[in-house]
Image: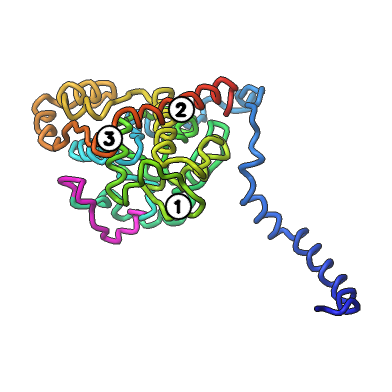
Amino acid sequence: MIPIKLKQLLKKPVYRLTDYIVRSDYFRELFWQTFRDLHRPNTPTRLNYLDNPYEDDSSAVSSGHATRAPIFITARFRSGSTFLWQVFRQLERVTAYYEPLNENQWFLNRGYGTDDTHIGVDNYDTEYQGLSRLSECYNPTWVNRNLYMTARDHDPALFTYINALIDAAEERPVLQFNRMDLRLAWLAAQFPEARIVHLYRHPREQWMSILKDGREPPKDYRYRQNDPLDYFYLINWAKDLRLHFPFLEPEGQHPYAIHFYLWRLSHMAGKQHAHVSICYEKLITDFTGVASQLFSALDLSVSPGEIDRLAGLNAGRVKESWRQYADPDWFREIEASCDRVLRLFLKAGRP
């Protein structure tokens, strides 16, 4: 027990120290970085952008990428995006970057191995050679923080990073993202000249592909705080995005429900912002037809012979391995419940 007199003696110094810490610039910055998401405005500004009346039109700087508009591929994890990236990588008039926001930071050229399910891929970093300077603007929090961005959000480092990749590309740049699907509004606003390709896969089969890296959760399992789950960042995504989408709170939910919510949100965002939307199952079953339409939509001149050559990369096949995990009614019950929550949430006009 601390004597009462000693407590009284300690009280003033402790109060003064606390007051100093709270008023310090360091504490205020730490508080802002930690809780800034809670202060985001819920309503868009009513102001309209106006040109600068003093700007000399003759000196206006136009985009340097007009003749080779960048192509952005957006997809969820385990949806066939590596295959689509590999297809673009084989084109002579393209520089295709693999997952620019990946935590492995390919520009450091550390010689990482490849995923054995990425058939025919021997490396991910060839296109990043000589770009170690990108470490100056790369932010590791892009992996799991601020995963939802609107056109009004501000991230100059992310713009600088993506723009540096575009500028460094010797040919038409293609950037394949797995962490941009709920940031597409921001991406489209920052790079209005770009073409966005959205790739999606059946949610149940994508779920089974996600489980390849971890133990399958029992069908009656419910997530508990700090359970050691990964499933391709599923819980990390839920914890970040629950600030905007409260139904993503993982506590008490089966991981498939979180996965399906994210699949739905990603699919809606892709359909809304992408110029081309591709179903993975159609891509692998009708590669020639889908690829021809895709290249045409992107103003890429690819001959039928070249498309036939690219078809040799196609090792995918349509499966229904999800039936080994649970019967259709189990999946339908969770999906119907998620859809009901989503409809009510969106009907309320948020976010």
- Report the Cα–Cα distance between label 3 and label 2: 19 Å
Q: Main secondary structure of the magenta part?
A: loop
Q: Earlier in the sequence, mark 1 or mark 3?
A: 1
Q: Going by the image, does 156 lie left or right of 77? A: right
x, y percent for residue 43: 64, 27
Q: Residues within 10 Å of mark 1 (few under 14, many from 20)?
A: some
Classify mark 3: residues with Cα within 10 Å, few (<14), some (14-19) or many (20+): some
Closer to the eye: label 3 or 2: 2
The extreme front residue here reads 220
In this image, 5 relative to 17: left or right? right
Q: Which mark is residue 205?
A: 3
Whether residue 115 is visible here, answered yes or no, is yes
* Residue appearing at x 64%, y 37% in the figure: 40
| Label 1 sits on residue | 138
The residue shown at (83%, 66%) is 15
Q: Which marked residue is nearer to the observer: mark 2 or mark 1?
A: 2
Looking at the rendered structure, the secondary structure element under dot 1 is loop
Quadrant containing the N terminus in the rendered view: bottom right
171 or 290: which is nearer to us?
A: 290
Q: Estimate the x, y position of residue 340 in percent, counting from the top left.
A: 49, 24
In magenta, the rendered stretch is 105-121
Residue at 53% in and 31% down: 151
- Residue at the disc numbered 2: 337
Is 114 within the magenta? yes
The Cα–Cα distance between marks 2 and 1, rounded to whole angstroms, is 39 Å
Label 2 residue SS:
helix
